[in-house]
């Protein structure tokens, strides 16, 4: 079983919600255990939305949420507040770094899954020794985390990737200082791999509700429109973090550098501590692999 900590900017794009649903189904199958979830967002409802989704699956885990003022992107709330109100959940007052340090002080071999801006992860790495652990953040991660999977970057020479752009300095810090192997799932890998539609068959599924709210607020579609499958940046990252999907993707090893403008560069080096994901299977095959798991 893989022990996972998820750090998510729940409430902007619905692929975070689909990623959490995927982890919940894999937890039902006994393949993963979600040990904690931290919100890399201060938007209203971010951790409450996580709680609502986990509660639907009969699961719970310690939650934490970034304090205000948060990041500029926290002004966008496409579905977190709506899910919070519909399912009667509330945001936690616990903050990410203490919770992350607590879980890491208690367990070894954790997988760190980051599907949003890397603010919380950078703050964890910068954290000093405290009453929770005599280790500073870098050494605590080194002792407790087997690897990190991050949906971050774009390596096709296009434009800077959204998660990186929200907090460039944190992305740079994590790329430079993360002491464990890190896998980066770039924008181009999840683009146009549209998943989540099977959830429309499940009555009052909170993830389907999140997907509908996202589509209404982001694209102006009617709430009655059922064609709201979403690109699979975060579900693919979650799939790989859980130890699934390695037959669908390949990896390039090297060192990732984040430029001051947010552009991502891989410097190829067989001794590098980073890997970036590349597609090996077609989009339809990846979509099918994710959607089949969502209905387990």
Image (cartoon, rainbow, N blue to C red):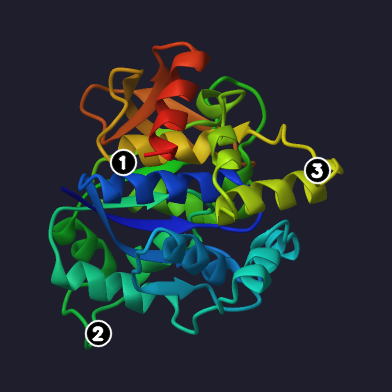
Q: Can residue 152 be seen here?
A: no
Quarter of image, res 224: top right
Name the residue at 46% across, 61% down.
Answer: 56
**Above or below: residue 275 compared with residue 29:** above
The span from disc 2 to disc 3 (Cα, nearest Å) is 51 Å
Give the label, 2 or 3, closer to the camera.
3
In the structure shown, which secondary structural element does the residue marked by tag 1 occupy?
Answer: helix
Q: Considering the numbered disc 2 on the image, is that residue within a helix, a strand or a loop?
A: loop
At which x and y percent is residue 162? Answer: 63, 43
Q: Which residue is mark 2?
A: 130
Instruction: Count neighbours of disc 1 (C-alpha within 10 A) and say few if under 14, some if 14 to 19, many if 20 or more.
Output: many
Q: What percent of the width, then of the height, locates residue 294?
A: 43, 39
Mark sitting earlier along the chain (3/1): 3
**Which label sits on residue 224?**
3
Look at the picture and state if 246 lies above or below 88. above
Q: Looking at the image, which residue is at 28% across and 67% down?
A: 137
Of 93 and 66, the residue lying toward us: 93
Establish if 3 lies above or below 185.
Answer: below
Q: Secondary structure at mark 3?
A: loop
Pointer 2 or 1: first along the chain = 2
Q: Residue at x 39, y 12 (%)?
A: 280
Nearer the observer: mark 3 or 1; the answer is: 3
Which residue is tagged 1?
241
Which disc number belongs to residue 97?
A: none
Marks 3 and 1 sit apart, C-alpha to C-alpha, by 34 Å
């Amino acid at each position: 079983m893989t022990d996972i900590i998820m750090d998510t900017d729940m409430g902007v794009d619905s692929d975070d919600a689909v990623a959490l649903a995927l982890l919940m189904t894999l937890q039902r199958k006994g393949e993963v255990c979600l040990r904690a979830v931290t919100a890399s967002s201060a938007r209203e409802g971010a951790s409450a939305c996580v709680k609502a989704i986990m509660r639907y699956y009969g699961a719970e885990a310690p939650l934490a949420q970034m304090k205000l003022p948060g990041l500029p992107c926290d002004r966008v709330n496409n579905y977190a507040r709506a899910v919070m109100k519909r399912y009667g959940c509330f945001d936690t007052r616990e903050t990410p770094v203490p919770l992350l340090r607590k879980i890491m002080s208690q367990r070894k071999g954790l997988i760190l899954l980051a599907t949003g801006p890397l603010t919380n992860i950078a703050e964890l790495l910068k954290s000093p020794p405290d009453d929770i652990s005599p280790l500073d953040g870098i050494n605590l991660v080194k002792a407790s985390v087997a690897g990190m999977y991050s949906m971050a970057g774009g390596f096709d020479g296009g434009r800077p990737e959204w998660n990186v752009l929200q907090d460039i300095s944190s992305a740079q810090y994590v790329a430079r200082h993360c002491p464990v192997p890190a896998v980066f799932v770039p924008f181009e890998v999840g683009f146009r791999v549209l998943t989540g539609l099977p959830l429309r068959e499940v009555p009052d599924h909170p993830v389907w509700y999140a997907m509908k709210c996202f589509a209404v607020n982001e694209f102006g579609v009617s709430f009655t429109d059922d064609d709201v499958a979403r690109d699979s940046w975060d579900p693919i990252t979650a799939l790989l973090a859980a130890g699934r999907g390695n037959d669908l993707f390949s990896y390039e090893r090297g060192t990732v550098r984040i430029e001051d403008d947010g552009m991502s560069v891989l410097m190829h080096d067989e001794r590098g501590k980073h890997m970036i994901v590349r597609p090996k299977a077609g989009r339809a095959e990846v979509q099918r692999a994710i959607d089949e798991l969502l209905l387990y």
